[in-house]
Image (spheres, rainbow, N blue to C red):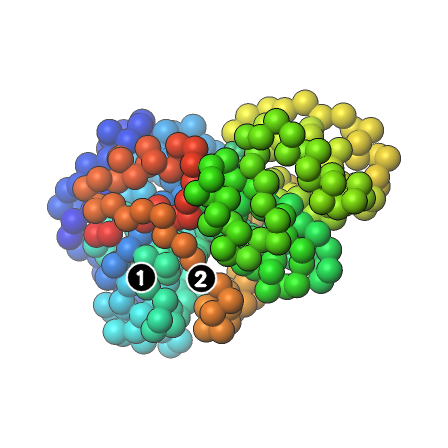
């Protein structure tokens, strides 16, 4: 089968489309013929070889995908051959025509959700769900700032938070991004490139501050976030690409909490609960992943470059 084959860590140029051996599912695995693969920023960090999780070389990148079940292992009871599914945490990379995944990481994809949308679910939607409920314990009626709402995790967070009846303020760095965030349910939008946007944020809450911040760029924002929290507010650090200076007094004075999370730390039980909820949201159409751009598999490098550029607009996916 065709797959992106990585023989050395590095930039986008080390990803080569090659013929690799076919895959056979083990007892508890599912073989999925992929129709789309989701690109997550973590794929890019792993490819660079600087991330704590370092796969053995050679390897195929990608954790998220969607397609049709081609075969199941002898011990698999809950996933049927020929069904439409999305996959998260694949056992073999999803930048490929086929992948293997544990049956627990394969979930039903409703008929009116496209494969590209299915590939946008795994990391982004599970991350947004866990950050909002598992970490921040967000409650109906609270105000959440989705700080970086125009990308994969951000759009997911806006949709999930609105479903839970939170007031949502979302930020983006481009007009197109702001429009997208608004269309997907944010009550208010702010441009994080505007020098006055934190003042505007304060005014939007009548000076009270926000209850929850989901932070996609903590290396830029964490210090400022702490000054934007309401009493007992919570910041969840989802993304950070470097260090940042904070004033701990901003946490003390508000009885605030700074929480960190990594999706890889989910327990199997937490994961099962989250995906049950996500499938429910797909079925009742409250969750609608947004695809910014599709690339053919042999342009995985170009797709990686786009993901790292500003001006996010939903999810970037590969079509094998
Ligand atoms: P993405 O699709 O590339 O989106 C990036 C988002 O960050 C966009 O909304 C972008 O807005 C925004 N952003 C850029 N500069 C910003 C700034 N100065 N202030 C606020 N927002 C800013 O990436 P993603 O998949 O949503 O992931 C977001 C981050 O979370 C990444 O760093 C990723 O590695 C991390 N992440 C962590 C976990 C975890 O388990 N902890 C899981 C998933 C993702 P504009 O482009 O419109 O400026």
- Describe residue 134's horizontal placement relative to residue 287 as left or right: right
- Describe residue 111's horizontal placement relative to residue 164 as left or right: left
Question: Between 290 and 137, which is closer to the camera in this rendering?
Answer: 290
- Residue 259 position (above or below residue 274): above
> Of the numbered discs in the image, which one, if any, rests on residue 288?
2
**Mark 1 and mark 2 in contact (Cβ < 8 Å)?**
no
Toward the left, the furthest residue is 19
Toward the right, the furthest residue is 253
Q: Earlier in the sequence, mark 2 or mark 1?
A: 1
Q: Under tag 2, what secondary structure? A: loop
Answer few, some or many: residues within 10 Å of disc 2's Cα (few below 14, many 20 plus, some between 14 and 19). many
Residue drawn at point x = 26 percent, y = 35 percent: 301
Q: Can residue 27 be seen in this snapshot?
A: no
- Determine the image quadrant of residue 163: bottom right
> Of the numbered discs in the image, which one, if any, rests on residue 295?
none
Residue drawn at point x = 32 percent, y = 43 percent: 61
- Residue 90 position (above or below residue 217): below
Q: Can residue 78 be seen in this snapshot?
A: yes
Q: Nearer the viewer, mark 2 or mark 1?
A: 2
- Residue 72 position (above or below residue 223): below
Residue 171 spot, x, y in % from top left: 56, 41
Question: Between 182 and 282, which is closer to the camera in this rendering?
Answer: 182
- Determine the image quadrant of residue 34: bottom left
Q: Label 1: which residue?
A: 115
């Amino acid at each position: 089968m065709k797959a992106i084959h990585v023989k050395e860590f590095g930039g986008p140029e080390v990803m080569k489309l090659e013929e690799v051996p076919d895959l056979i599912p083990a007892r508890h695995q599912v073989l999925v013929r992929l129709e789309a693969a989701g690109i997550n920023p973590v794929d890019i960090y792993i490819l660079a070889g600087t991330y704590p999780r370092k796969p053995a070389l050679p390897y195929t990148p990608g954790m998220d995908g969607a397609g049709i079940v081609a075969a199941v292992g002898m011990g698999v009871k809950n996933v049927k051959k020929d069904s439409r599914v999305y996959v998260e945490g694949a056992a073999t990379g999803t930048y490929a025509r086929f992948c293997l995944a544990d049956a627990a990481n394969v979930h039903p994809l409703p008929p009116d959700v496209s494969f590209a949308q299915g590939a946008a679910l795994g990391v982004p939607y599970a991350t947004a769900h866990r950050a909002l409920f598992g970490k921040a314990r967000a409650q109906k009626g609270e105000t959440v700032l989705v700080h970086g709402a125009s990308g994969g995790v951000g759009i997911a967070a806006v949709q999930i938070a609105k479903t839970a009846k939170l007031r949502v303020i979302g930020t983006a760095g481009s007009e197109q991004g702001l429009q997208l965030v608004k269309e997907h349910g944010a009550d208010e939008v702010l441009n994080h490139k505007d020098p006055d946007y934190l003042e505007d944020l304060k005014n939007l809450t009548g000076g009270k501050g926000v209850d929850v911040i989901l932070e996609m760029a903590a290396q830029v924002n964490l210090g400022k976030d702490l000054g934007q929290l309401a009493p007992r507010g919570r910041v969840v650090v989802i993304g950070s690409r470097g260090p940042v200076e904070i004033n701990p007094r901003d946490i003390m004075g508000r009885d605030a909490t700074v929480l960190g999370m990594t999706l890889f730390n989910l327990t199997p039980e937490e994961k099962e609960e989250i995906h049950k909820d996500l499938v429910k949201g797909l079925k009742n159409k409250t969750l609608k992943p947004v695809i910014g751009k599709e690339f053919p598999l042999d342009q995985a490098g170009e797709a990686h470059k786009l993901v790292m550029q500003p001006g996010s607009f939903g999810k970037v996916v590969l079509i094998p």
